[in-house]
Amino acid sequence: MTLKFYYHPLSSYCHKALIALYEHDVTFEPVVVNFGDEAAAAALHALWPVGKFPVLRDEERGQTVAEATVIIDYLESFHAPRRLVPASPDAAWQARMWDRFFDLYIHDHIQKIVGDRLRPEGSGDAHGVAEAKAKLAKSYAIFDATLGGKTWALGDDYSLVDCAASPALFYASLAVPFSDTTPNLKAYYQRLVKRPSYARALKEAEPFFSWVPLDTKPTLPEEARGAS
Ligand SMILES: N[C@@H](CCC(=O)N[C@@H](CS)C(=O)NCC(=O)O)C(=O)O
């Protein structure tokens, strides 16, 4: 098989790229990396010394591709028939901007909160966590206003931004639940978890949900039950 996807079913940034693989219905070999397994972690580092996943290895083209957004771009350039990054220049820069928004202003904040729970006893950063939670609430409000009545982040077509938004919102909402002040966001989230590509990724993550180091553990959303 020419494409190998290094990931873990629970990892949020891996979900982002996995959604695109499922959206495109691309054939690939899943390689589950458990960081607790030294050999598996070393194999990932050998491919991508940064040591983070997702990583895509294209054996046929001899390329190693890291960073979820870049993997999505790469799939579109070489392996996928349809576009998750819109072709029109105006829609394309908006897709890029909101992709950055979800990574930097939602996803990274929930990573900060989760990361804090993994720190050794006594070395937590309570101030940083409180700040991250406040920033999440602010980002929710910003996106709720931007989204308005649109079905997907950019309008009628499911895009890169929706791939980014799905895991970011899934995990962020465990730490900072959506409130009635962001009804557009709440309804959008329900559409995201029902999308077959994300419902499938969530179903595959479900056996690992108890590993999430937050007080509120994830549960498979009702909308994602029955996904295959
Ligand atoms: N900017 C990267 C972020 C990737 C990332 O943070 N991956 C996490 C899992 S969600 C990871 O590999 N964590 C392990 C580590 O940092 O050691 C992307 O967009 O792909």
Image: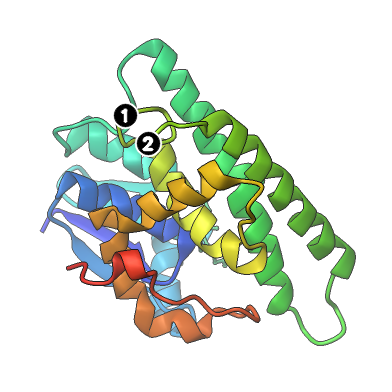
What's the mark number on residue 151? 2
| Nearer to me, 18 or 200 | 200
SS at circle 1: loop
Distance from Cα at disc 1 to Cα at disc 2: 6 Å
Residue pointed to by mark 1: 156
Residue at 85% x, 78% y is: 123
Is 123 rendered above or below residue 70?
below
Q: Which image quadrant for residue 220?
A: bottom left
Amino acid type at image mark 1: Asp
Q: Is residue 119 visible to us here?
A: yes
SS at circle 2: loop
Name the residue at the front extreme.
Answer: 180
Q: Describe residue 36's horizontal placement relative to residue 201 as left or right.
A: right
Residue at 26% x, 64% y is: 200
Q: Position of residue 161 (x, y in %)?
A: 43, 38
Are circles 1 and 2 on residues that touch, CB within 8 Å?
Answer: yes
Q: Describe residue 69's horizontal placement relative to residue 60 as left or right.
A: right
